[in-house]
Image: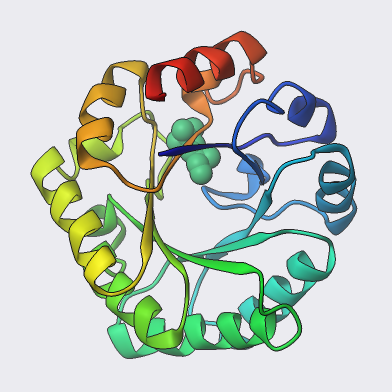
Amino acid sequence: MRLLVSPSSIEEARSALAADIIDVKKPSEGSLGANFPWVIRAIKEMAEKPVSAAIGDFDYKPGCASLAAYGAACAGADFIKVGLMFDGRDRAFDLARAVVRAVKDDFPEKTVVIAAYSDYERLGTISPFAAAEAAAEAGADIAMIDTGMKDGKSTFEFMDADTLASYTEENRSLGLATALAGSLKFEDLSALKIIDPEIIGVRGMVCGGDRSCVIRPELVEKALAMIR
Ligand SMILES: O=C[C@H](O)COP(=O)(O)O
């Protein structure tokens, strides 16, 4: 299980360098808010680690999403992560396919992550299970769950451990890796180790529980020690 940590700036990324994957995002623009290409590039140059970039919580706009994905890939991101903030499996396929093509035509080695939200019912968006099917059909690499609304409620409040384990298992049978995130807490790590996704994504946990604070390197080290 690899630890992905999401800094919001170049300065904050320095505190996250011990993580397995540095995930560049801009939380002020949403759960999967996109940061600037120059920030992605600077973090990629600084980190001797895989860098991921969130490109946004998207409405059904495959053209817009594909261009953002291409931009993130050109800026140096190794993982390009898009959130599906709409409903409908066919539409999810269209957008995922556009993002996959935008990235893989020029960068076949890069990884495309299609994210859906654990709180999809309150958001009225696609379920993570349906999104993962669309992601696999579109040729993406990783299916992800995050919370769409960052109000402190954790993914475990919307999907229990058994459901997350089934999701992870189904993804494997679809040929996808799994990333789980969404206000995860240190006390969730033992359950996550049993669920065994390939990646867990955190921010609030390593900021000391508050998403508005800054990443603390000692908490990144603590999380790494707990999942090893
Ligand atoms: O990709 C992971 C997210 O940044 C998780 O953020 P969070 O732990 O604050 O919900």
Numbered marks: total: 0
Residue nearest the observer in this picture, 6 or 78: 78
**Residue located at (38% from left, 72% from top):** 86
- Look at the picture and state if 10 lies above or below 103: above
The answer to whether residue 210 shows anywhere in this view is: no
- Look at the picture and state if 89 lies above or below 222: below
**Residue located at (53% from left, 30% from top):** 203
Residue nearest the observer in this picture, 53 or 20: 20
173 to the left or right of 115 = left
Q: Quadrant of residue 184?
A: top left
Q: Quadrant of residue 105?
A: bottom right
Residue 135 location in percent, x, y? 39, 77
How is the structure coloured here?
rainbow
Residue 19 location in percent, x, y? 61, 31
- Look at the picture and state if 66 lies above or below 172: below
Residue 40 location in percent, x, y? 81, 51
